[in-house]
Amino acid sequence: MKLLSELTATVTTRLADMEAEAKTLSLELDTLEVRLRRAFEAVCIDAIVVYLNIERTRMLDHEKQAETGASLARFPALGIYGLSSLFTGKKPNWDRAISEVLREEPFGDIRIAASPDGINIVNVSKLAREQNMDIAGIVAYLEAKGNEVLTWSSFEARAKNLRVAVLKGQMILMGKEEDKLQLKPPASPHFVSNEI
């Protein structure tokens, strides 16, 4: 009988130890799962930043080409203006002609427009040229549409802070498994849309 009670006590102790170890392992697994989710969300933020930077670089290259084309197209206009004055017999207004040729158009201003609907990269200078507006007017228009318009450096700083907050567990980006990173093709040549 004594042997049976010792055996029962030993088994009970071992079961209690195994239960405590199982709880510890379960907590460690939960902690690991949380850390993996945080790391996944941080990688998603990094992927968005890299993707937007690639699109931004592509847009900047197009802007450089457009600027070169625009500057080359200005000088023949001077010659045409001078030739037309020969045929009309009027003295050309060179001050006006030169100011038109040397007029600065916006080029190379690419910004990030963040809204509850997503993150867009916007070619602000191209919109300004097409709409005959200045950069501030386009930014005000985008902000009136509910966007927060950021420069690239501001966006990078925000993304870095967001990444740090996610890794520390101060913020959760994705609540469900279905809420994965989705990249949409651009809706127009001015916007590149990325849904998070």
Image (spheres, rainbow, N blue to C red):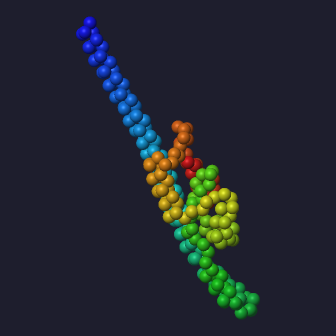
Q: How many numbered discs sit on the rendered protein?
A: 0
Q: Residue extending furthest left?
A: 3
The spot of residue 31 in percent (x, y) is: 41, 38
Q: Nearer the viewer, residue 157 or 27?
A: 27
Q: Identify the residue at the far front of this view.
A: 2
The percent coordinates of residue 65 (x first, y second) are 54, 69
Identify whether 55 is placed above or below 24: below
Q: Quadrant of the N terminus?
A: top left
- Looking at this view, name the residue that lies furthest to the top: 1
Residue 76 visible in the snapshot: no
What residue is at 55 percent from the left and 64 percent from the top?
Answer: 151
**Viewer can see residue 144:** yes
Q: Residue at x 47, y 46 (%)?
A: 169
| Residue under the point 32% across and 25% down | 17
**From what the image shows, is residue 53 above or below residue 97?**
above
Question: Residue 5 at x, y = what percent?
Answer: 28, 11
Taking the spot 26% from the left edge, 14% from the top edge, the residue there is: 6
Q: Is 111 situated left or right of 14 in this image?
A: right
Q: Is residue 59 left or right of residue 129?
A: left
Image quadrant in which you'd find residue 129: bottom right
Residues 15 and 146: in front is 15
